[in-house]
Image: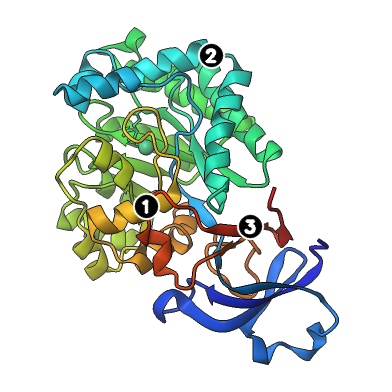
């Protein structure tokens, strides 16, 4: 298909733009020019100047923006099935971590893996996301925790973007856990490894944003602040794993740096929500981790609504707390576990997911937006969050190009 100019017709389009439910347009058409949406509206109103364009009909199917998975740890070595067994026998996530399991055990497996193996294994998970209409995903480092392996993870993430049509945004997550060789010396790890590696990764063009894990089993707010100061100096946006297991004021700290997002946020309180609202920080909800860790503390969804904090949803795909490579199932969990509406779930994996990555050119369907699109064999957008373990994707379009293989 020639991407230069093309009409897609016979669609219902959930634009995820504006305030009407789903931004829905019935009996709709969309015109793509040079990889961007040039026009969208009722088919009857198609501009006359498009009459000669090639056209593809979709038999009344639903079109949405391409999905955005804005929080993944999809590059890692090994797996943690044994830890899954331990937790089912009663050990908590924190107990496993303190006993040398958890994130640190994946660090061992990632450090010893060949880069090609990391790539190959990550691609199987990326392909599962693409099969469900994902056109943009974020990938974090954070299982290296040494100079060499952090850089390797980020290079693998960049390589994925060369091998697949998806857009990849990288986040440097050197402040993810304290590696065994720095046990009890978190400050030294931040100063001697994390910050110098961030500078080096940035110099190599490997970093789009800087992330951290602010938690009792990871780093305290003042340690995260030191990393964020360097991010600010380098001109990089920040985001933070905050208030997942306890409330250390991480989201407030992130908001004070104008963070793109604060993620997890189950233990967030009203002041934290207000700080996020003021800073325009997105709340990235991760129901896969909530489900896997059998958490009971719900994120403050009502407060987010009240304060107008946009809620994104993401898989958090990782080998420990969220071995989940399905954004559709994530949408279902967002509704069933967090009581989000199916519309909030769809906006959470489109418009708000894009915003959590600082990408204003995608996530909604409107003139001038990048033509990353998904077409589904469903009649109504609520169906996307409703089924479990069922993938109704019909077609995907990356930058205006139909790409179904
Ligand atoms: O987002 N919370 C910290 N980081 C990951 C967990 C990674 C792991 O358990 O390996 C998360 O849940
Ligand atoms: Fe995470």
Looking at the image, residue 333 sits to the left or right of residue 298; the answer is: right
Residue 6 in view? yes
Q: Is residue 244 left or right of residue 19?
A: left
- The residue wearing badge 1 is 388
- The picture places residue 391, in percent across and down from the top left corner, at 49, 53
Left-right relation of 261 to 219: right
- Secondary structure of the residue carrying tag 1 is loop
Q: Are marks 3 and 2 in contact (CB under 8 Å)?
A: no
Image depth: mark 2 or mark 1 in front: 1
Q: Residue at x 51, y 43 (%)?
A: 138
Q: Where does the N terminus fall, quadrant-wise?
A: bottom right
Identify the residue under disc 3: 396
Which quarter of the picture shows residue 72? top left
Q: How many marks?
A: 3
Q: Residue 243, image x and y in percent?
A: 23, 42
Q: Is residue 257 visible?
A: no
Label 1 and label 3: CA atoms lie apart by 21 Å
**Residue at x-position 14% and y-position 44%:** 296
Secondary structure under the numbered disc 3 in the rendered image: strand
Closest to the observer: 125 or 351?
A: 125
> Residue at the right extreme?
52
Q: Label 2 belongs to which residue? A: 113
Give the mark nearer the N terminus: 3 vs 2: 2
């Amino acid at each position: 298909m020639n991407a230069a100019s093309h009409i897609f017709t016979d669609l219902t389009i959930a634009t995820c733009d504006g305030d009407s439910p789903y931004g829905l347009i019935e009996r709709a058409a969309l015109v793509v020019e040079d990889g961007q949406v040039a026009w969208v509206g009722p088919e009857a109103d198609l501009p006359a100047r498009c009459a000669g364009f090639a056209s593809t009909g979709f038999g009344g199917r639903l079109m949405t923006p391409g999905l955005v998975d804005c929080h993944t740890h999809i590059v890692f070595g090994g797996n943690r099935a044994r830890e899954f067994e331990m937790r089912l026998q009663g050990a908590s996530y924190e107990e496993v971590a303190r006993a040398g399991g958890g994130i640190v055990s994946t660090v061992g497996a990632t450090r010893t893996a060949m880069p090609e193996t990391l790539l190959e294994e990550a691609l199987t998970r990326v392909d599962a996301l693409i099969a469900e209409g994902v056109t943009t995903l974020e990938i974090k480092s954070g299982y290296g925790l040494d100079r060499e392996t952090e850089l390797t993870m980020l290079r693998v993430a960049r390589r994925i973007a060369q091998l697949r049509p998806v857009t990849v945004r990288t986040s440097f997550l050197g402040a993810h856990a304290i590696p065994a060789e720095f046990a009890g010396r978190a400050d030294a790890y931040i100063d001697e490894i994390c910050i110098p590696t961030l500078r080096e990764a940035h110099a190599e063009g490997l970093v789009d944003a800087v992330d951290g894990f602010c938690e009792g089993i990871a780093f305290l707010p003042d340690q995260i602040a030191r990393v964020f100061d360097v991010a600010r100096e380098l001109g990089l946006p920040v985001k933070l794993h905050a208030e997942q297991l306890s409330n250390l004021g991480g989201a407030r700290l992130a908001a004070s740096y104008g963070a793109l997002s604060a993620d997890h946020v189950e233990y967030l309180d009203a002041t934290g929500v207000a700080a996020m609202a003021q800073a325009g920080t997105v709340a990235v909800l991760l129901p896969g981790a909530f489900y896997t860790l059998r958490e009971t503390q719900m994120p403050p969804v009502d407060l987010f609504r009240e304060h107008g904090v946009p809620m994104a949803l993401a898989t958090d795909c990782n080998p420990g707390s969220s071995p989940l490579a399905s954004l559709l199932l994530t949408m279902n969990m967002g509704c069933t576990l967090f009581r989000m509406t199916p519309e909030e779930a769809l906006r959470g994996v489109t418009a708000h997911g894009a915003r959590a990555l600082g990408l204003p050119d995608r996530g909604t369907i409107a003139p001038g937006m990048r033509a990353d699109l998904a077409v589904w064999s469903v009649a109504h957008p609520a169906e996307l969050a409703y089924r479990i373990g069922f993938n109704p994707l019909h077609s995907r379009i990356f930058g205006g190009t139909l790409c179904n293989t």
